[in-house]
Image (spheres, grey):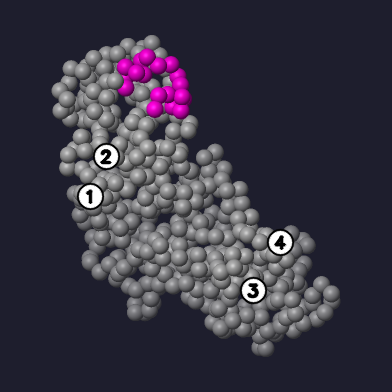
Amino acid sequence: MHNMLSHALPDSSLLKLWPFEEARKLSERVKDRDSEKPILLETGYGPSGLPHIGTFGEVARTTWVRQAFEAMTGRKTRLLAFSDDMDALRKVPTNVPQQDMLQQHLGLPLSCIPDPFGTHESFAAHNNALLCEFLDNFGFDYEFASATKYYKSGTFDKALKRVLEVHDKIIAVIAPTLGAERRATYSPVLPIHPETGRVMQVPILEVNPEAGTVVWEDETGKRFETSVYGGQAKMQWKADWAMRWYALGVDYEMSGKDLIESVKLSSKICRLLGKEPPVTLTYELFLDAQGQKISKSKGNGLSVEEWLRYGTTESLAQYMFQQPSRAKRLYFDVIPRATDDYLTFVQKSEQQEGADLYNNPVWFLHNGEIRHKDTSPISFTALLNLASVANAHEAATLWKFLGRYDSALSPETHPYLDRLVSHALTYFNERVKPTKVYRAPTERERKGLTDLAVALEALPVSSSPDEVQNVVFEVGKRYFEKSELRAWFGCLYEVLLGQSEGPRFGVFAALFGLAETISLIKEALARSEVKLGEAED
């Protein structure tokens, strides 16, 4: 999902999309740096849980900033996917096997806990492998990094010595944000107990920067002097983040709104260590169908697997691309809109060049190489409506209508449309059909629908979608004021299709067929409100 783009961009002031804004900030940060040295962007992963839709969002969005920066500057970049696999397991996730076994290993680093799935040398190794497989499946270009490996190999040693040198200053930054009890025992250093292997959260009694050691006592009163090198200690979260930025020279990292305070504190610590913190972007968190924050433990969101059952990868990327700093509902009903937004942008790109093209999200979603074959002449919403009125269970039913609408359409000539047909059928039968309700028309709507059936009967069978749409408008204007026409179209969707929104009615009628649409209207006029499951198949 990434390559070096060498062709010249238009004047960068014309590039308005948010990844270009981020790229400008990053460019300002590194303007005095050796241009041959790659710029480092980082994403973080907590391997106590499985990769999820937020993981995809963060890596995709960081990749788009990377793409914008490389295109604007021609400079090389690296993307580091960093796994905090030396963190202690504080609570057992509910979605993994062997809960009792994991309970016995609370407090150990994730990389020292047996894999409950029995496939890898540790729980962290299992989840890290899933992360890499997950990112590879989407074609991301990244380097994987393990905290355990970096601590044990000495990669962080110089930075850890620096942490000890400014130990008390770090405490002064963090202590005011803690409660009294926690403040009394806080240290940025978490030694690993040499006997139990647990990550210890204890007061540090002495700090020796020259020797690289800390002195502490465990709960039995036994005293230890532990080296902070070679994986014998790790840093507490905010200090750990800052130490990593300092050690690796991270230039860019984004994070969720729930980490705003952590970013501020880690940035202060990074400056204490002696470097400027990276450019950061705070993205909003996802909300569920009721507008509540999505929680992995509640399972009230939408997984990547669920999205890709009902929609394409491009639709997921389109959803993630739009306005990362605005809170968005992440539920099944956003999939059709995201799919159609993507299709609209691809179609627009066919006539665009220069700044207009770079300001089209598809330039990012397709990695700068727009693939016009990855589109469809029929919207996803129209396919859903077609599946609905045809009560379709198989692709052949929809293709019968599509072929009649346009004889040039077939699964062979339009493979992307064929993918959408498959997703639309699954979405309709699993998400729409079980809850579909038609309402009976009001008296005014009944008169309008009766007139519409007569007007459509007078049209030639070969009428274009626009000609049908014009008739629908004309009939609507007889019964609804101009300001009320939205209600007329709402009536068509709710009475004929059993839903609150739909495609342009002219397109739908052309797809479904004029005769079939007229029959649909007459059936609706004869019907009171019923559930689809009770209607004739």
Q: Which residues are magenta?
A: 520-537
At label 3, the amino acid type is Cys
Q: Position of residue 209 (x, y in %)?
A: 66, 85
> Which of the 4 image quarters holds residue 164?
bottom right
Q: Label 3 vs label 4: CA separation?
A: 16 Å
Task: Work out whether 245 lies above or below 447.
Answer: below
Task: Work out whether 293 lies above or below 442.
Answer: below
| Residue farthest toward the bottom in the current orientation of the protein | 211
Task: Work out whether 513 lies above or below 207.
Answer: above
Q: Position of residue 475 (x, y in %)?
A: 26, 17
Q: Is residue 404 left or right of residue 18?
A: left
Residue hosting label 1: 412
Residues under numbered marks 4 and 1 in contact, where contact means CB atoms less than 8 Å apart = no
Residue hosting label 4: 100
Mark 3 vs mark 1: in front: 1
Q: Is residue 370 magenta?
A: no
Residue hosting label 2: 399
How crowded is the residue under tag 1: few (<14 C-alpha within 10 Å), some, or many (20+)? few
How crowded is the residue under tag 3: few (<14 C-alpha within 10 Å), some, or many (20+)? many
Residue hosting label 3: 112
| Residue farthest toward the right in the current orientation of the protein | 221
At label 1, the amino acid type is Glu
Q: Quadrant of the N terminus?
A: bottom left
Residues under numbered marks 2 and 3 in contact, where contact means CB atoms less than 8 Å apart = no
